[in-house]
Image (tube, rainbow, N blue to C red):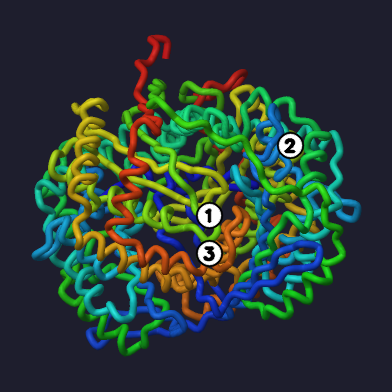
Amino acid sequence: MLRSLTAGCLALATLGTPALADAVTTYHLKNGLDIVVIEDHRAPVVTQMVWYRIGAADEPPGHSGIAHFLEHLMFQGTATMKAGEFSATVEQNGGNDNAFTTSDYTAYFQRIAADRLELVMKMEADRMRNLQLTEDDVTTERQVILEERGQRTDSDPGALFTEQRSAAQYLNHPYGIPVIGWRHEMEKLSRQDALDFYKANYAPNNAILVVAGDVKPNDVLHLAEKTYGPLEPSKDIKPRSRPQEPPQLAERRLTMADERVSEPYLVRTYLAPERNAGDQKTAAALTILAELLGGNPTSSVLAKSLQFQQKKVVWSAAFYDGAAVDPTTFGLYLTPVPGVDLADAEKAMDEVLAKFLKDGPDPADFDRIKTQIRAQEIYAKDSAEGQANEYGQALAIGLTVKDVQDWPKILQEVTVDDVMKAARDVLNRDHAVTGWLVPKAKEAAQ
Amino acid sequence: MISLLRAAVALFVFALPLNAETAIQQVTSPGGIKAWLVEDHSIPFTALELRFKGGTSLDAPDKRGAVNLMTATLEEGAGAMDAQGFAAARDGLAAKIGFGSDADGVSVSAQFLTEKRDASVTLIREALVNPRFDQDAVDRVKGQVLANLRASAEDPGKIAGDLLSARSFGTHPYGSNGDGTIDSVTALTRDDVVAAWKAAIARDRIYVSAAGDITPEELGKLLDRLLADLPATGAPQPGDATFNDKGGVKLQPFPGPTSVVLFQQGGIKFTDPDYFAAVLLNEILGGGRFSARLMTEVREKRGLTYGVGTSLASYDHAQTLVGQFQASNEKVAEAIKVIQDQWAEVAKNGVTEDELDRAKTYMTGAYPLRFDGNSNIASILVGMQMMGLSPDYPRTRNDRVNAVTLDDVKRVAARLIKPDNLFFVVVGSPTNLKTTE
């Protein structure tokens, strides 16, 4: 989608998509800009991405959605470019461009012929510090983001359910606030709100430039010095410090009913540690735990028991993505077969989890997951863009290039004991939110 | 297996391939199977794409959904392996093997490491040649398909798509959902699945491409081993569909704050001399760029939607020009009016020289960017073959785009764009919408 919002709540755990160390070069400009260059010379194409270490979880209270709204407004003009000229220029050069916002970061990218790199670097550098907004542009674009919320959230009971579950998960941390924003706050977002957020957070010392494709690292450095180098750093950039969660003392449960739902389903998310610089071992164990429990729709622990042996569910899954600034979640999902109610399916799931905590994984399953992780290192090299995402995201959440490059090895070194310790620590219902989404009988008038 | 969590499937596909720099080799196996190959040994894996022409349109009339169910059950056990055994073998090889179906074909998409190539190909061969279709596997996957169908019945996008198909194509297979209906799928038996397999998976309808770490000789031998034991022939292909081109607005009431709107009229064949003029016209009118007319008028100027776009949809047996958007219920009528006005304007006056130049620059410049790794190249190559293109098409494609003149676009706009034949289907609770049926 255009100028889109990255949701990814039920995304299955990724097994890591690392790059060969020798194809990655890093630089750091004096004004604070971090640079990552990923070489892939198979096609004359380049992707430029600029990642800002600022996301929806960094918004001022009462202004939910401002990070994403600003992302839309970044396609308006600057002192030297008129509104819409950025994308029009990229198109004129046969390229594509877009942007996305999450709780932890905001990223802008262009994909274009490799000999046009300087042009897009110049334009991206320009809008890092020189954005200009008119009241009219802001008014129309606010209608667009409200339409976006209508289309992607309010029209989708699954998306509304996710919003409610996240809000229940985080009592105090802003991860409980949706990236798109609450509608009543979005309606009040102003031009000045956007400009204040922009001026406070968009600067070279809060950004990462990733260039991937048919380029030479030295050339990229030279161009970066020319385009981004003259930009003044901001003195206002501080380390991220968000309100953190108090200890969770009681299980949280919610049931949401909607007439647009046909298949009831359950999602349970446990608060879980995230990947941290120099400390990724627990996250690696949780990544493998998610694969074991529910990564494979046929042979995972949940699928084997609930789908194949007990025939109580249509689908089951487990998901975990440790790429976050603050504590994240480990999730489980199931849809029961018709005739089995959610309480029965949930009870069966809890019994499978209890048995797993007692018996541990099948060694053959464990070995196959390790094999797949090794293979993924090879498959990942097929996409320079994928690698650009991996590095950009990691650096935007506070990991280092070394952390990215160590990740496959850390995954590979995870032992059964590591997985079981992580499972015992995390799979505790007192630290979880269990949500049921169920059908609601339609009113007679419908 | 079938998953509810799969990515939202695009409503229409416009897959015009490829990359001018790509060196396509034509390979014929010792046994006579033809394939296209882009050889690249820099990463030790191969992407392999197979297509069996026909797909869900080969369903017997009262067996709607059989090909879809069959395709989804191919990986649920083959030869000596049950579903668990097949999954364990595939994962132990770290091979990626996906089976899919649509209205024009059954697809097999595979990626395997060079060091595991032989064993991976054996596994794919077992699934295609010796699928088990165990009763419990058929029942389990059927349960997944039925769950998807029940969810689709509450999904305004799916409802709109089904209504549009039925209105446009009537009793032709294109007129109904290839996944089947709850009734038709419920009635499917294991025998129906086996019959669908015999109808859809055969050597007389196969297209093959590969990209990556494999030589032409290796690919030829691989293909004979993989495909030689398939039946020579399958079911006859369907005939061309008749398109109902009556314009109008139809409303299907559905709760919620926004409406889904699809709109469609007749399209143009790829073999038509004006095809590239039509592609440029579509790009200017309803392309995904912010400067396309519909995006400018409906989103950028009026904030009526998050996104609107059109596509020339080319299927084997029909062509349409189809578009879509979503909007808040109170904005739907205005957005439809804007689109109708744009339709009339472009039919009458064509486009400007500046718009045409910019669309050409964009289309020709963006073309090489599709070259994006082995997996994408293999997929593009097999699509080209199904469209009947020659391997040198990438070298001539941009020239054909650049050769289009302003008069060409004006002529094709007058001929193709039919404001009176534009049909809208609206699923939602729009206010002040005038309907015609």
Q: Circle 3 sits on which residue?
A: A403
Q: Are marks 2 and 1 in contact (CB under 8 Å)?
A: no
Q: Position of residue B177 (x, y in %)?
A: 34, 42
* Residue hosting label 2: A141
Q: Earlier in the sequence, mark 2 or mark 3?
A: 2
Give the percent coordinates (x, y) of residue B128: 20, 65
Residue B70 spot, x, y in % from top left: 21, 52
Give the residue furthest to the right.
Answer: A79
- The kind of secondary structure element at disc 2 is helix
What quarter of the picture does the C terminus of chain A occupy?
top left
Q: Residue at x 64, y 52 (%)?
A: B287
Find disc 1 in the rendering and name its residue: A276
The residue sitting at 79% across, 44% down in the picture is A200
Identify which amino acid the numbered label 1 is placed on.
Asn
Q: Is residue B405 above or below residue A255?
A: below
Using the rendered image of the protein, determine whether residue B153 is visible from the camera's viewpoint: yes
> Could you tell me which secondary element the residue under label 1 belongs to?
loop
> Residue at point 14% right, 54% down?
B195
Residues at marks 2 and 1, CA–CA distance in whole angstroms: 36 Å
